[in-house]
Image (cartoon, grey):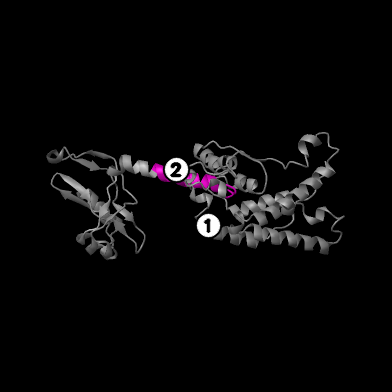
Amino acid sequence: MTYRRKLIEVALPLEAINKASVRESYIYRGNPSSLHKWWAQRPLAAARAVIFAQMVDDPSAHPDKFPTEETQERERQRLFRLIEELVQWESTTNETVLAYARDEIWKSWRATCAENRDHPCAKELFDPDKLPVFHDPFAGGGTLPLEAQRLGLESHTSDLNPVAVLINKALIEIPPKFAGRPPVNPELRKEGTLLQKEWHGTQGLAEDVRYYGQWMRDEAERRIGHLYPKAEVTVEIAKERPDLKPLVGRSLTVIAWLWARTVKSPNPAFAQVDVPLASTFMLSTKAGKEAYVEPVIEGSGYRGSSPSLRPASEADSKRRRAAY
């Protein structure tokens, strides 16, 4: 079996990869990490660069094509420029750049197949018409198999955690099955525009996800929306929150709820009252952005006040809880 050194064994444009990885951490729209946070989520840019460099031969592995160190370094710099472009966030959907990278991978793979055509298992191991399969037994957030798939490799993954399995199904298993297919939702079918345009990649699937996701949200609101009432902005609330003055009289959708288990009050006089088991009513303890909910007792019942932005310490919040 003939072995040739890969680009990753010689050098990589690390500065460009690092910069792209840092920039990517501030991008949420379209970023798989926004689907579900995962421990030690690998940057897409770094994974893409590493897989590419593992698959592509270093120029020094082909002295017949690049006989001198100068020609090898010139070719290496060309590959570096490709990697520098490949790791950019915009390249995740840039088919021109991705196709260029896939061509380089195919070029190295076919050269490897040609050199090992006399191998006893060449038909299975060195098929020039099929790239090696990518396996990740501990896929986690799915960064590596996703990028391997983006570079043209067939990806197979597994994980013990069912959440990781779900993430990988959503990233690498389901989308390819619907690639290039039109959506099936009744709204677009009714418009009659399905056959008037080409559906590239997962555009059709994305349209269906948006349609049926909105349907599920509307259906959930219809069934249980009454359990999540809107918050009316009153004059009293505006006094505490000057930023809400323009919204006085309007009802706003609550975007977060504090949940707590409850027990019956140990006070015999209020034995019928359910008391929340909460260690604190603080919503934010960040300096300059302190906010908390203050319980308001009304007869034998209680309610939570609108979030207060007055500076309050964690100790103050706990004292209020104790009194409550």
Q: Nearer the viewer, residue 305 or 150?
A: 150
Asked if residue 200 is among those painted magenta in the image, a careful observer would answer yes
The image shows residue 78 at horizontal and vertical percentages of 74, 61
Provide the residue designation for mark 2.
212
Spatial CA distance of label 1 from label 2 is 29 Å
- The count of marks equals 2
Q: Image check: 159 left or right of 274?
A: right
Q: Image check: 161 left or right of 136?
A: left
| Amino acid type of the residue that numbered disc 2 sits on in the rendered structure | Tyr
The image shows residue 205 at horizontal and vertical percentages of 53, 44
* Rendering quarter of residue 268: top left
Q: Image check: 280 left or right of 272?
A: right
Disc 1 versus disc 2: nearer the observer: 2
Q: Residue at x 59, y 62 (%)?
A: 19
* Rendering quarter of residue 64: bottom right
Q: Which residues are magenta?
A: 197-216
Q: Residue at x 21, y 48 (%)?
A: 303
The image shows residue 212 at horizontal and vertical percentages of 44, 43
Provide the residue designation for mark 1.
25
User: Do labels 1 and 2 touch, CB within 8 Å?
Assistant: no
Q: Residue at x 70, y 51 (%)?
A: 102
Q: Nearer the viewer, residue 176 or 154?
A: 176
Q: Nearer the viewer, residue 94 or 1?
A: 94
| Amino acid type of the residue that numbered disc 1 sits on in the rendered structure | Ser
Q: Residues within 10 Å of mark 2 (few under 14, many from 20)?
A: few
Name the magenta segment's main secondary structure. helix
The image shows residue 45 at horizontal and vertical percentages of 61, 55
Q: Earlier in the sequence, mark 1 or mark 2?
A: 1
